[in-house]
Image: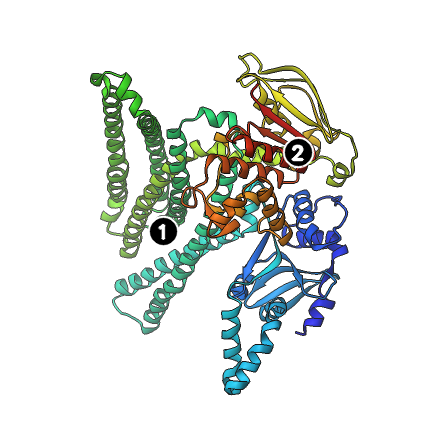
Amino acid sequence: MDNHQLIGQFSWPLNEVDAALAALAQHCFGALEQRVDFSPTPTDIDALDTWLTQNAHSLSLETQAVSLPYQNSRELLAKTAPAIIRIPSGEEIKLLLVVKQSRGQCDILTPALKRQKVKLSDLTALLTAPIEHPHLITINQLLNEVKIPDRRRKKAVKTLLSQRLKDKELTSIWLLRLPPSQPFWRQLKNQGIPLKLIGLTLAYTLQSFFFVLSWWLIGQAAFSGHVDMGWLWAWGLLLFSQVPLHLLISWLQANITIDTGQLVKKRLLLGSLMMDPTQLKKLGVGQLLSRVFDAETLESVTLSGGFIALLAVVELSVALVILSAGLVGYLHSLLLLLFLIVLAAFCRHQFRLHSKLTQHRLTMSHSLVEKMIGHRTRLAQQHPDKWHLEEDNELQHYVQLSTQVDKSTARLTDLLPRIWLLVAILAFIPAMIDSQAHNTAIAVSLGGVLYAYQAIIKMLDGFTNLTTAAIAWQQMKPIFQQTLTHAQASAPRVPLSAAEDHRSDTLIHMHNITFGYAANQKPVLENGDLSITKGDNILLQGESGSGKSTLASLITGIQQPSQGTLLLKGFDQASIGLKAWRSHLVLAPQFHENHVFSGPFAFNLLMGNQWPPTVQSMNRAHQLCLDLGLGPLLERMPGGIMQMVGETGWQLSHGEKSRLFLARAILQNAELVILDESFAALDPKNLKMALNCVKKEAKSLMIIAHP
């Protein structure tokens, strides 16, 4: 397809990006249940990323700006849909909407709201042309001088371009995705998980049916006394059909496991980040570590146990059909149903015992980690005779619970399935003794009993895994559901454009604010009033525990007041949403609550601004580092501003970390910057330099310090 056709007929101009975003969301997610009021369209490419982020949020979606390495551009481009891609078209900005990608082709959504198929190779060539063109002239000259044959020329050009452009990236690509905070069922539907589960169930049912039918054919031949070649061929075909069905089942299981595991991890990560800081501080390291273990268990065991249980249900359904066609008919099927009811009662008892054991094990893990952290204190303060008394009692109780669980497990997995075999066989012995009993009916009944026995064993295996997963779910449920609360708090009730266009000199207005960390404790703040206007520079001083940091957390939306009115530009938080609220305000918390993440120094600077960064944002970050006195640090680090820092990277001093935190806050371009004891680790010279820089860069400023 001609590139001019891609640019002209299928692309969207920048001034229609609002219609383009709405159309892409409607085609891919059905996201437009009501009309959305978008903010004014951007006028340049630098403002496009912010515009997409804000307005995708209004559609309950999110955009992710990505960069694709040149060397793997085609392979990675095949995984971007749905996406918005800027295509080269001279000075005019053109956007391409990719709805779907499969088998080397892309479905492009045109301004006429029709889908047009485009080869992935054509799209890749269009995007890579601007960075390839400057090098093609010199490469062609080189190949002409060495007289490379035409049949090898194309491969040579491709190899040379790959070497020269290996550090280049394709930018201006935005992925459109459902955020992890959306209802989990909607995320599963978007990934096609329900359809895959239906396909898995049907495939396994068909495989079981073919398996039973193949043995029925053999049984018929055996009891009739002769083997017909036609029936033998049918038996062979039925057995051969097991191979593709087994491959299909394995493929569906793998896809469901990978896709669901990915969604669960994203959901738990967001839930962890959205946990209430007050509640988080009450949890010890051991309890948090236990939840990490539970997260791994929830992902791995749930899926494996779920598959086994699903397949066991299919096998039991087939067994019911086989038994009803056997010697004693529906009596056998009724007996199997009664046995499953008894089995469910034993499973319930097993679940209760396993829950007690797991809860005690988690308590022991928490206690052990806390004692390891405070080991030096125990050595100094506790008498040696009492060091291990508590551990001995915990271990003794654990052994008692483990013994109960082991006995119950043995009854459940070893004894009960064999009881089914005994009772089921005894049930059709009287009918089998009857001289009129047909050998075929006897074989069908015996086969049904054995098939049900295998299904029961498989079901108990799945139950064991699901029991572990259900107990882990009890621990992880608050984190998993934390995203729903976050999504509700983040959802704006007034159009984003209305909040942005509202003009008010009063930035923050607080009236009669009261806040306490617990209902039965005295409030930290009570009946407080505060007004902050644009351009204010405020110094907030007070003794330790007087509520300075609490006030900052209330203003920035980290904590919610118990009563009173808190407005930002005349809007409360419920009106404009938590995300918009925090986009106007930024808090640099105290040193022990702020962190340097393992990654480039530039990432730690710009993580709250834009990543991957633009040239402009990198230049501003570099200049801000110089203004804060971090120039010598950048010169010492071998990688400069892209040097890896963190636990496994370049180690920063306390003063350097403090100035990094200052720069990170300033670079978020908020209208109010709150610095909570951010200057405590600085010497007088660097303190003066940092303070002048902050006062120059911040639009409005609040500094929290001790008297």
Q: Quadrant of residue 353?
A: top left
Whether 9 is drawn above or below 557: the answer is below
Q: Which residue is mark 1?
A: 322
- Please state the horizontal and vertical placement of residue 75, each as a whole percent of the image: 52, 64
Residue 68 percent coordinates (x, y): 55, 60
Considering the image in quadrants, where does the C terminus appear? top right
Neighbor class of circle 2 (other Cα within 10 Å; few <14, some 14-19, many 20+) is: few
Q: Is residue 16 above or below residue 700?
A: below
Figure check: 391 above or below 274: above
Residue at horizontal 58%, vertical 49%? Answer: 611
Viewer-proximal residue among 596 and 217: 596
Distance between mark 1 and mark 2 Cα atoms: 82 Å
Q: Residue at x 37, y 44 (%)?
A: 330
**Residue 526, numbered label:** none
* Amino acid at pointer 2: Lys
Residue 288 in sight here: yes
Name the residue nearer the viewer: 132 or 287: 132
Q: Quadrant of residue 386?
A: top left
Q: Amino acid at mark 1?
A: Ile
Residue 695 is tagged as 2
Q: Residue at x 31, y 72 (%)?
A: 228
Give the percent coordinates (x, y) of residue 224. 28, 65
Q: Is residue 610 visible?
A: no
Q: Secondary structure at mark 1?
A: helix
Relative to the observer, which residue lies in front, 525 or 696? 696
